[in-house]
Image (cartoon, rainbow, N blue to C red):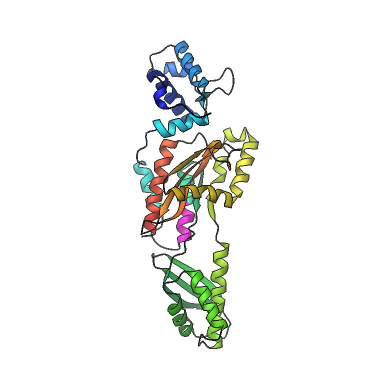
Amino acid sequence: MPAPPLCELTDRARDIFRLVVEGYLDSGQPVGSKALSSGGSLNLSPASIRSVLHELEMLGLLAAPHTSAGRMPTESGLRLFVDAMMQVGEPSAHERAAIAQRLPAAGPIEQALEETSALLSDLSGAAGIVMVPTREPRLAQVRLVRIAPDRVLAVLVGEDGAVENRVFETAPDDAPLDQAANYLQARMTGRTLGEAAAAVHEEIASGRSALDAASADLVARGLAVWSEDAARRPVLIVRGQAKLLDAAALSDIERVRSLLDELEAQEAVARLLDRAREAQAMRIFIGSENRLFSLSGSSVIASPYRDAEGRVVGVLGVIGPTRLNYARVVPMVDFTARQLARRFS
């Protein structure tokens, strides 16, 4: 049942509805008329408040889990609150400092994405999610450094400033690195790793590479490791699933099981997050509004993050119960997305 427009509610109904939603999001418990009247801000009797609560329930905005319990917002009620009533500010100074401090300014991009997911989980008390960029950066520089008689470190520097390291094994005959490094630098600069690997493979296979056997073997070993790493890269990084197992959640073990099963379906979660990527804006999915989390009744707050040119390269956010503190989590997710974008600049 779609929520009525906010303009259809009286001022009294709006005030009571807002207090119920805010109380529920703060405590996770239904809010009763006695608690509302004792708050002092309404100046209404419990009987008058109960009458308005009943009206809001008839409109599909509130529900009573038990006959003697208070009211809690429905998914339609949460949608109305988030879209029309919620006041969103900036994260607190403490949260901004924590986000800026924990996001590494340099190093492998995977490390920054892992830390971002863990950071969002820690700050929100829910599960943090980061969708890995699908766009491979174009390479600016390739370096090979021997770190052991049979091991070589390859340093890949992207045009966007990202640095990735790969270690791979070589034959113990200590093949010279200069020829292989110069060859790779000439053919990988300006290309993505996938494009460069395809071109180098084709050239070596056709015998047009002008590499000696040892250097050709060195290049082939490196490309094999790089390709394997790329294939194993996760579509989605999820951290903090254990935070979803709070006391309220454990009272409904089937919902918890459904949520954990849904999080295992990484490709399905990634498709959901793609809706934020395609919209190029913050998206909030509440409960059964998305089919993926309809069984567990979970909410998703997701924001795209961008590279130095302003192009969307991935999505980050939070998955948790519908009673998430949206007013706090939404600006936190947005701020984190802006901070992570600086990592790509």
Residue 26 can be seen in this image:
yes
Position of 314 with respect to 258 (left or right) is left
- Tally of marks: 0
Above or below, 50 relative to 132? above
Position of 257 with respect to 49 (left or right) is right
Q: Quadrant of residue 174?
A: bottom right
Q: Check residue 268 for magenta coloring.
A: no
Q: Position of residue 171 (x, y in %)?
A: 58, 82
Above or below, 210 relative to 304? below
Q: Quadrant of residue 327?
A: top left
Above or below, 55 relative to 110? above
Q: Check residue 108 for magenta coloring.
A: yes
Of residues 29 and 216, the one nearer the viewer is 216
Q: Position of residue 241 (x, y in %)?
A: 56, 45
Residue under the point 42% across and 41% down: 330
Stretch in magenta: 105-116
Residue under the point 58% across and 52% down: 267
Of residues 51 and 264, the one nearer the viewer is 51
Q: Position of residue 112 (x, y in %)?
A: 45, 57
Residue 174 can be seen in this image:
no
Residue under the point 44% across and 28% down: 22
- Please state, as top left, top right, bottom left or bottom right, where the C terminus lies in the image: bottom left
